[in-house]
Structures are given as C-alpha cells and as structure tokens.
Amino acid sequence: MGQARKVHAITVVLISVLILRLIPVAGQGNPSSPTDFDLVIFGGRILDGTGNPWFKADVGISAGKIVEIGKIDPSRGLQRIDAQGLIVAPGFVDVHTHLEGAIELVPDAENLVMMGVTTVVTGNCGSSALNLAEWFEAISKNGIGVNIASLVGHNTVRRAAMGGDFNRTPSPEEMRRMRELVQRAMEDGAVGFSSGLEYLPGAYANAYELTELAKVSARYGGLYATHMRDEGEFVDKSVSESIAVGEQADCPVEISHLKISSKKRWGEASRILKLVEAARDRGLQVTVDQYMYPASSTDISILFYPWLFEGGGGRVHERLNDPTAREQVRKDVVNKARAQGFNDLSFAYVASYDKESSFNGKNIAEITNRIKNKTDIVSQADMAIEMLEAGGARLVLRKMSEADVETILKQPFTMVASDASVMGQGGSSVPHPRNFGNNARTLGYYVRERKLLTLPEAIRRMTSLPAQTFKLWDRGLVRPGMAADLVLFDEKRVADLATFEQPKRHPMGIDYVIVNGKVAVQKSMGTQPRAGRILRWKIQAAQPVSVSLSAEQSLRARDEEILRRFKALQSEWKAKRLTRDEYLAALLDLQMEEVKLFDVVRKSKEVDPEYWARGRMDYPTVIGKEIRELMKTK
C-alpha cells in the first residue's frame, strides 16, 4: 500500500507540473507552441480612420503589418493587449512638424508618441534638410521614435542658390539651380515642396518663382505646402496667392496652420474659407491644417520686417548700431503690432531666451515693465530689439480668436497638426503646449466637451485624411496589409494636461501606442523602442525639368518683380515709413529699371506681343503716374 501511495503522489506532482507548464504567462503566448502573430489586440472598439462608426474586432499583427482583423483567439499572439473599454484607431499622422536639428538630439520623439502620433511630415515652412538622402541616412543610424516623411523647403533651396543677396528676382542660372535642388529632393523621397513666405529669403520670392518650383514637385506627384505670406491683415490675399500657385502649377495645395492672427480680422474665418471652397469647386485639391490653440509660436524675428535681416546676422547688427536705422526698426515693430490690432506687445510670450531664463513664460510687456519700469509700446519695441541683439528668443504669440479656431476645425478638409518639434520635459523653457497636447486636446476638449466634431470624424482628420493628402498609402487606416501604427485610448478619459503655464506635460487617457508593430507606449508609459521608419515618396515618371528660363519668362519675371517692389513701396509710403524724398528716390530708381526692361522687350524677337501689348508699356506707366503725383506735392 505504501508503495502504491508513493507512486500515486509522484503521478499527481508530474501532472500538476505539466498543467502549470501549459498555462501561458499573462501577456505572452504559449511558449511551447508556435504563435500566429507577434501581437494580438483584443476586445477593443475599432475606429478605422474612414469616419465610419466603431465596430468590435480584434487585430492581429506580424512583421510590422496588420495581418488580420476579426475574432482572434488572444493565445495566438506572442504578445497580447487587452483593449476592453478602449478605442483602437490608426496612429495619428501629424503633417506639420519641424524636426530638423531636434530629432538628432531627441530621437525617441516621446512628446509626440505619447499623444498618439506615429507618423510626421517635417520640412515645413520652407525649411528642410538640403540633402534629404544624407539627412535620412544620418537620423536612421540610431533609430527614430516616429515615422518621418519630409518636404523640401523653398527657403533652404533659395538660400543655397542665391547666397546672401535675396531682395531680387533670381537669375536664370539661380532659377535652374533651385529647380535642380527641388528635383533632387523629390527623387530622394520628398513628399512635396514647402514655402515659408513670412521668413527670409522666401519673403522676397514672387508667385512666378513659387509656381515654377511647385511644378517640379507636381511632376513627381508631390504637393505645395505653404506658410503663407501673411496670416493676419492680408490673409485673404495670401490664400488667393497660394491657390493661384497651385492652379498655375497644377499642384495640390496644403495651407499650413491656417489662422487669422490679426485682431482686426477676427471673426472672418468663414469668409477666408470660402476662397478654399471655391478653389475646390473648380477642381483644385486644397487642404488646410491647424493646431488646436488660439496661439502660435515662432522666432522673435516675426515681430520685425524682413529688410532688417537681409544679408545675415552681421548686417542686422550694423543696422541696429545705426541710430537712424534703429529708429526705423523701432517704428516698424510698433506699426506692425498696431496694424494687426494690438496696442502693446502683451500678446508675445517668451518661450525660451538663453540670456535670461527668468523671462521664459512672461510676455514682452511684462518684461519691459520689470526691466525698464515702462509700459508704453515704444519701450516694449526697444526691449524686443535688445532681446534680438542678445541672440534672439522663441515666442508664443497669443494673437488668435477661439471662435476662428473652431470655424476652421469644422471644415471637412481641415487636418489636425501640431507645428511641433521633439523635446524632453526638462529645462527652463516654456514652449507652446501643442508640443505635448495637440491631439489629446482635439479628442478631449473639441470632441468630448465642445462636441464640434464626432469622434469618428476627428479620427479621420488625424489619420486617413493626412495620409491621403500626403500619399502615405500604407498609413492612416486599420486594414489588413496596412502598417501596424495604432493608438489605443479611453474616449472618456483622454485629455491634454499641457497648459501655456506648464506646457511640458504628457496627456492622459492614451494607454497604448504601436509603431510599426512595436509597443511604444504601454499603460501610458513610454518604452522607447525607436521603431519609426523613413517614409520616402516613391518616384513617379517625371517630365524633364527645363534647365533655364526662356527669354520671355525671364522678362516677365523681371516685370513682375518691378511691380511687386512698386506695391511694396506704396505700402511703406502709405504707412508713413518713408519720407517723401525717400519714396521719390526709390520710385525714380525703379522707373529706370522699368525703362531698361521695356527697351529690351522692344528689341527682343522672342516675346509674346499679347502680354506686353496689354497696356503695361503705355506711357506713363503706373510708376510714372505715381512720380507725377508726388512731384505735385511739396
């Protein structure tokens, strides 16, 4: 009997051990049998990115791809995520970011990933890497936290082609060089061409130059993304110019961070949007993006007019050391603010100022009162000049109305984009909260609280719409065969925690983020797998790019530039920034250029008679008439 009991006990132990070995560890598949998926997400409600209502299904992922959607046994996954109570959506695609010089230092891109962003487009506002192939290779060496696509920047190629002399029309050779640089970038995988027309050197480019370069992008299937020439007082003219470039180049147009930043124009968003709707009705693809805050962020240089920065930093200091020029700069800052409806610089908050970190988070009016014990706008302009001289600063500009933000958001062609960079949570800077909260703010505030969008529609604006616009065809939808970029969030809890006062705070309610099949956020904690990839636009059969301007094109470009400069002089004169003698002298110089141009036209055999016979060469010209009127006055 004793022996029989001993055998029975051993048998029970062996069976128990075998049973324990057959039970999988939580979160892991059965190690003793092969699994079908690297990861199974089960029990969630899927919003697939199309704008359709959610449906209940599980997702099986292998080799960075979604391979199955339906009822899936969780044990078939090597890893498992229980998504009960969560929304499963495509990873967010942020089409307006600025990563150059930052992703190299912060490759995990955790501030973006933690708010559900898995793919970004950089190279915006006219600034990109000049050699995209080299840059892509360099940032890939140590891994990147998000998928990265890039535009090629107009300011970047213009600076490379024209050196430091920007306030002019490019020569035929310089135009050829810019075309070549855009073409090379498109062949290296750029998704389009971007401009930043409030910044140098792009501020001096005319519509013809932009059109010619946008044509190169269009030949390769790319688009034209623009930080417009003006987003405040003349925003309607800027939208019209952007659309005209797209129509003439036969190129889709993406208007970056659409806003109305002039207080005088607040409430006119609906009227501005009618220009976009009309262009779309004519058959031009025009889309816009926006960040979800009534404030922008950029360099302190935005407070000044571009002429101050012509020729580079050395020339800036020369001008500011000249009492006459410095006085003009001071007037410019004051006049520019007042033209936009602001009586002081309290709208301009310092995000980062290396010389004095105590300025961070305060506006220039507050800083001026503290440092100079003065409250007038002229003293505030002096403070801005001194900060520029000391190395410059990054600003947050609270110049927009919430009502306009909401009006723009309601449009079906509006995408949610952050205009962010990558950064950590340390340091004394007080950046724009969009860097940490943009997407979560959309879901928590504008969807759940304000109910401006349905949840499915908000997801579409952050996923399939941007992916479709930038032709990222394997992103933006939850479908078999698509890249496994996913975000899992609690629609009842998701919220941005970043504020203007405390902007470096990750959101809540975003529980999991998957980048190319790898878990990058687990239970709201970053895991830093650096699973991102470079997304290159696949080259289409491009038409040959003309190597030089024709004689006719060159003459027209000169004519357009003369008229542009004339209008700019008129604006300066009407704004009382020029004396009568200064205005007259400038007009006489311009008239001389006009006379020389018309002489060449008359002698040329390669011009279009219809263009030049339209009255442009009738005497006196508009410039001559202005000179006559001015001569009548004392």
Image: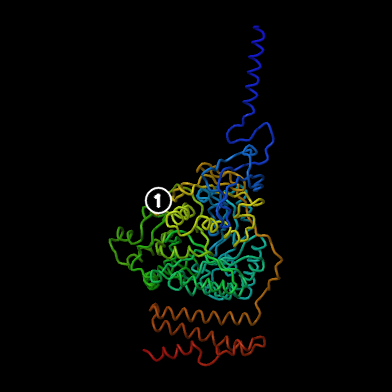
Quarter of the figure with residue 286: bottom right
Quarter of the figure with residue 208: bottom right
Q: Is residue 332 visible?
A: no
- What sort of colour scheme is used for the picture? rainbow
Residue beneath disc 1: 502
- For the point 54% across and 52% down, the residue is 117
> Looking at the picture, how far across and down is residue 538, in whole percent?
68, 60
> Looking at the picture, how far across and down is residue 520, in whole percent?
56, 45
> Looking at the picture, how far across and down is residue 333, in whole percent?
39, 69
- For the point 54% across and 84% down, the residue is 593
Type of amino acid under label 1: Gln
256 vs 37: above or below: below
463 vs 44: above or below: below
Circle 1 packing at 10 Å, graded few (<14), some (14-19), many (20+), is: some
Depth check, front residue: 234 or 85:
85
> Looking at the picture, how far across and down is residue 342, in whole percent?
36, 68
110 vs 203: above or below: above
Q: Quadrant of the C terminus?
A: bottom left
**Dot 1: what SS?**
loop
Depth check, front residue: 485 or 570:
485
Depth check, front residue: 527 or 178:
527
Q: Is residue 53 visible?
A: yes
Quarter of the figure with residue 93: bottom right
**Does residue 307 appear left or right of residue 212 in this picture?**
left
Q: How many marks?
A: 1
View extreme (left): residue: 373
Q: Quadrant of the N terminus?
A: top right
